[in-house]
Amino acid sequence: MNKTLSNFILLVFIGLVIVNCANRGTPEGGPKDEKPPKIVDEIPKNFSTNFKGKVIKIYFDEYIKIKDLQKQLIISPPMTTQPEITPLGGASKFITIKIFDTLQPHTTYAFNFGNSIVDNNEGNPYPYYRYVFSTGSYIDSLSVKGTIMDALKKQTEPFVNVALYEVDSTFNDSIVYTKVPKYITNTLDSVTTFSIDNIKAGKYMLMALKDGNSDNKFQQKTDQIAFYKSIITVPTDTLYTLKLFGEDLDLKPSRPFLAASEKIAFVYEGDYTQMKINIKSDVPADFEYRITKDEKKDTLHYWYKPKLEVDSLIFNISHKNYDKDFIVKIRKQKKDTLTLKADPTGTIGLTEAFNIRGSTPLVGFDASKVTLMDKDSTKVDFDTTFDTINNTYVFNFKKKEENKYSMQLMPEAFTDFFNNKNDTLRYSLATKKASDYGFVRFTLLNANYPLIIQLTDEKGEVKAEQYATKQEDIDFLNLQPGTYFIRVIHDANGNKKYDTGNYLKKIQPERVSHFKEIEVRADWGYPETLEFTSE
């Protein structure tokens, strides 16, 4: 072969390689694959009866993977031993379900995969795939449908379990704490409606659970719950509405401990106002104590004097259905010192109070050692109230717009439980001009009183509220500009606060109405009509 021919063949070969490489993917690329995977076979077939196997395989026309299985997969009825489902963390053309549980006889089972099955390349989901089989001779085909809503918030939580407990000879109210339900489904991440399918006729208790640890049992501390007011009978055409709420925690004290010299910490869950703390150790005649609440934690601080030269102290904690003694070891510790914290700082609202909180229990206040002046050096009168449990003095005084205020506390204005006193302190505050604020007036139609009208932020945190007991316009003045969400609590028991529900006591949460958000602008306001409908 001559040299010229060899060179020609080499050039042709290189050209073919380049063309082949170019054909593997053009700069423009092809159309994006938006088609979900398809099921080509199921072994055994979906909706099989007389099921006795332990392994299920679902085959697809392309490689798939499973994502968010823990959130998405719901097995109904729940299994005590969870099945093994693969692939996890990889891709495959089939899904394998290995069952380890002993299946109940004459029962229809459903594996609800939600949107967890996606193709390997583009992540297109095979939506809401359900694999159903029966250990009996037929598939149960009845359904219970409805809607989940949050009892207090406008937005409902995603991934809420909705379940049925069979009402038979073993049923009791505490079953939600100890047993998994007979049937279960999930609202997943984008819907608030539910449908519990493939159930048999009978009587059931209908409930919902925002399950904190995915065990399908109610735990008061971590879960939200909803329940229908009465037992339901299936079949039914009723569309049920369930209101999801968090219960007030039952009071649960923890073992107290020495937090500082002459300061015992009592940690608790629930409503501390029910808790009584008594010292059982022998103490001298001049023994004194004060109890304050921690600013951030669920803790009560028990301060005492004089200092006791003992190895331990015995305390009794009691409340309804609870009575227990605790031993607190006493050791050498530093004593807390007195510091004062002011709130707010900088800018203060025209109707806002000024607060001073002590780090140790405050027992004395000398108003004559406090001077409050405005920007014109004019003395401003004030009065105070003392919140003993929060250890806070509240200063109330009339404020003018676009003004400045300076407060000076001379030494010994405050005295604490251990006879510590403050040094000289100065605080500076300022108000904005009225035109920096906005306002809104609400006219209420078809309202049943009393009502709590709240303006909240997007997260539901209350920014302003008013209590209404009769038909009259409600004005919110001096509002910071911004977007507010309108929430109205129907205060059925007239205690001026929102009352949540309680499952065991069969108490539903108080009714809450939501209205469209409003935009409040500076130096501007408008009337808004809130029209109520009967529930």
Image: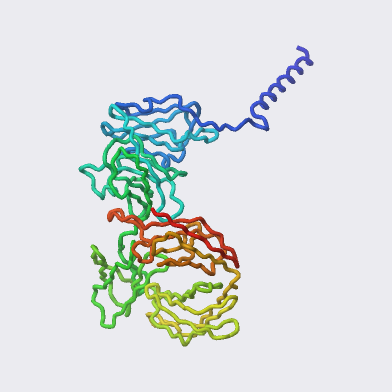
Q: Residue 448 at what x, y percent from top left? A: 39, 61
Q: Which residue is nearer to you in this view: 403 or 486?
A: 486
Q: Residue 284 at what x, y percent from top left? A: 26, 81
Q: Residue 145 at what x, y percent from top left? A: 37, 41
* Residue for point 32% across, 38% down: 77
* Residue for point 32% across, 39% down: 236
Q: How is the image coloured?
A: rainbow
In the image, taking residue 221 as reference, residue 474 lies left or right, namely: right
Q: Quadrant location of the N terminus? A: top right
Q: Is residue 317 visible?
A: yes
Residue lying furthest left: 169
Residue 131 position by quadrant: top left
* Residue for point 60% across, 84% down: 376
Against 280, residue 66 (above or below) is above
Against 116, residue 371 (above or below) is below
Residue 413 position by quadrant: bottom left
In the image, taking residue 315 as reference, residue 500 lies left or right, namely: right
In the image, taking residue 482 as reference, residue 186 lies left or right, namely: left
Against 286, residue 188 (above or below) is above
